[in-house]
Amino acid sequence: MVNILKNSMLMFLLLLFGSWVFSSVTASVSYDHKAITINGQRRILISGSIHYPRSTPEMWPDLIQTAKDGGLDVIETYVFWNGHEPSPGNYYFEDRYNLVKFIKLIQQSGLYAHLRIGPYVCAEWNFGGFPVWLKYVPGIEFRTDNGPFKAAMEKFTEKIVSMMKSEKLFETQGGPIILSQIENEYGPVEWEIGAPGKAYTKWAAEMAVGLGTGVPWVMCKQEDAPDPIINTCNGFYCENFKPNKDYKPKMWTENWTGWYTEFGGAVPHRPAEDLAFSVARFIQNGGSFVNYYMYHGGTNFGRTSGGLFIATSYDYDAPIDEYGLPRNPKWGHLRDLHKAIKLCEPALVSVDPTVTSLGSNQEAHVFKSKSSCAAFLANYDTKYSVKVTFGNGQYDLPPWSISILPDCKTAVFNTARVGAQSTRMKMTPVGGAFSWQSYIEEAGSAYADDTTTLDGLWEQINITRDATDYLWYMTDVKIDPDEGFLKSGEDPLLTIFSAGHSLQVFINGELSGTVYGTLNNPKLTFSQNVKLTAGINKIYLLSAAVGLPNVGLHFEKWNAGVLGPVTLKGLNEGTRDLSEWKWSYKIGLEGEALNLHTVTGSSSVEWTEGTQLAKTRPLTWYKTTFDAPEGNDPLALDMSTMGKGQIWINGRSIGRHWPGYIARGSCGDCNYAGTFDDKKCRSNCGEPSQRWYHIPRSWLNPSENLLVVFEEWGGDPSGISLVKRSARSVCADIFEGQPALKNWQMIALGKIDHPQAKAHLSCPQGQKIYHIKFASYGLPQGTCGSFQQGSCHAHRSYDAFEKTCVGKQSCSVTVTSEVFGGDPCPDSGKKLSVEAVCS
């Protein structure tokens, strides 16, 4: 057993530094039935998704380093076609789209890269990553055996591969890229369309392999992926997935760490215990590559979010939050999981597991070779802890958990026992109140030469080409003086059918009503009695898109806007159909045409301020300036008093704001145990789906930063505040005798015989522990932020932490009865819960 321990420790150290060695020299990359092989060595690879356009280049180094510190081997990213080729043949690879720079930073960190070229990405990204101009290529049909589409897809894929080759970024050239992906989750589409889909799959695979990258290609959710391409799994769980050939490894390209937030939806949360359980279960069933989607979600800056109603925040409840900070305990718990898995790697890559039953819902997966042994002990019961016998020992397994034994003897990690600290975050206002100026955009205010008059109602994207969210539909309605409703006071009923996504109706310059759809039902109907007068009445409809669809069939056929019918009921003639009348169209807003979001453009109109400031008025532009606050804490805008619109900082778009869309449903308690789905654990019900909007520090000047807000609905800008994100408090929740990786390593090195659990607390850099809010050794209850004493409590619990931790950035306390003044309940298994406030 001592030899097994030493071998595991040696392999752990080699793997810790091995990626740095491999990244600087040419290497071969292949695969066999067990794993991806690098220079002939099988590897268990832990990967995480970080999408370069969803953060800033200034954030990339810290994001990559935090991922590495979290135990990742690989950074995965999609390639975003519409960001790189905004018009045919015109390419852009600067700023947030500097793909080469991003890949080189991965290389400099000593990590590998997985480049998912697609070029269809889905990803809750506008139009699934396709450039909108592609929709207007003659004869095109998306993602099928179609000549125009395949030609465009091949051209862009070749462009990306050639760029990576010219920069020597594939692993076989000495670069970090060890994997590439062609297409994305195409299997369901192929099943739907049949033979053309199969032909397209075969073509895409052959095209990709023919580019000669020297590294394996994958296709996710593609059961019939042609050789040599590896088919992979996406989902919350993938333990039962098998590749389509026995000689291909079992790979998981998307383990969903949470879920995206939609405007109108609650905020999803996936417990760290369940996420760790899913990974351990996949590994114990022979999996060798796991990618977290997302590891850092980031922000949908500008108008990049899609499909419909996707929020500006793409936080995804990922291990690194939207602002670039570790989300604990998720980040720390997964870090510990990765360390435990790496200790098992020699055994995992050498043999297939032997599975034995340990009970009705319990089993052991044992990987035993001549030189190594690792075991995974699983309890699938969702309610009850169990004590199982394995080998010569007994092991406590909480519900829905797996314990990892790198030497088939010592449990060093359990997926349901979180040893990492939890961190509670806060958003604190910084600086003073903003001094706002306003400019009101009149409904339908448009330059005559910017309008187009057409017969009937036209689809929105065909007119705007997605250059803006907004399209005005304008027509005149003549009302005769003898209309009966003018005398009776029974206003006529205006009914408008729209393909979505949001609609404001103005009658003679005044807002009559607003309607909007949902992610699941973007189509909407406005049906309301409206005030009309004798003579000419102007009906102006402002249709707003909220992202283009990102998934489904026939991208070339999707639509938005007012498609009709539009009717007016209650006239002397009965019902008047306005659908085929002449309608005038204006693309975008007056403020957009004037570039009011820029320093130069904002000086082109007269703004009002002070007592004349417009509040709660629709179609209002607001501007102010502010100085950048001191420090490095991430920043955001609190937009809770506003309705719907867009935000710019120094001419750069932060994204769409929509705090006026309140999250539907009811949010209950969250139990980690049991199968997770995106509806299971949610928060924020009855509150704005998104309140805070990230401002990258790198977008700010030291002073005189221009903040511009366009408000569609009407809001109170005096309630907008600049806030910083920082730690409120840190918590530990440790069971007596809880497995710890560090203890196991010390046993292996012969330094200790009887390990003891420790509670570790650490405030972020620049902060210290100044108060112990709660501490209890015994049977405490609750979670971080809401701990309560249980039926037994050690009276010196507070004293131990006050003495050891207050005034320090970090501290650790051994979890034993002696430290806390004796055993408060000798016949019970105990734990320690503590919360410390950071200053």
Image (cartoon, helix red, strand yellow):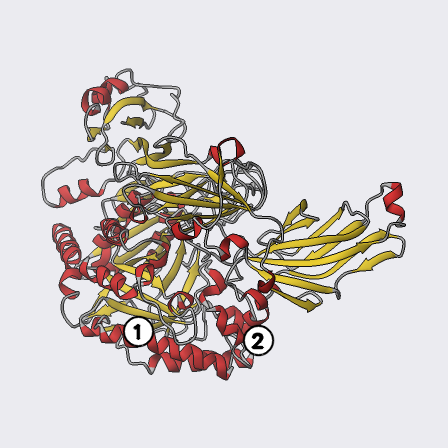
Disc 1 on helix, strand or loop?
loop
Residue in the foreground of this view, choosing between 572 and 124? 572
Numbered circles on residues, count: 2
Specify the quadrant that holds the C terminus. top left
> Residue 407: horizontal and vertical position, in percent?
21, 50
**Among the two numbered marks 2 and 1 on one chain, the one whose residue lies closer to the N terminus:** 2
Question: Is the residue 630 above or below the residue 282 in the image?
Answer: above
Asked if residue 220 is positioned above or below residue 406 in the image, the reply reads below
Q: Nearer the viewer, residue 409 or 684?
A: 684
Nearer to the camera, 609 or 465: 609
Label 1, residues with CA under 10 Å away: few <14, some 14-19, many ≥20: some
- Farthest residue to the top: give it: 795
Q: Amino acid at mark 1?
A: Pro
Is residue 590 visible in this depiction of the protein?
yes
Query: Neighbour class for label 2 at 10 Å: few (<14), some, many (≥20)?
Result: few
Q: Residue at 56% across / 72% down in the picture?
A: 556
Q: Quadrant of residue 231?
A: bottom left
Q: Disc 2 versus disc 1: distance between alpha carbons?
A: 27 Å
Q: Which residue is mark 1?
A: 216
Residue under numbered circle 2: 193
**Mark 2–mark 1 contact, CB under 8 Å?**
no
Residue 589, percent across and down?
Answer: 55, 55
**Residue 400: image x %, image y %?**
41, 44
**Which residue type does callout 2 highlight?**
Ile
* Residue 401 in view (yes/no): no
Question: Dot 2: what SS?
Answer: helix
Left or right placement of residue 34 versus residue 381 in this view = left
Q: Residue at x 41, y 73 (%)?
A: 244
Dividing the picture into quadrants, the one containing residue 42 is bottom left
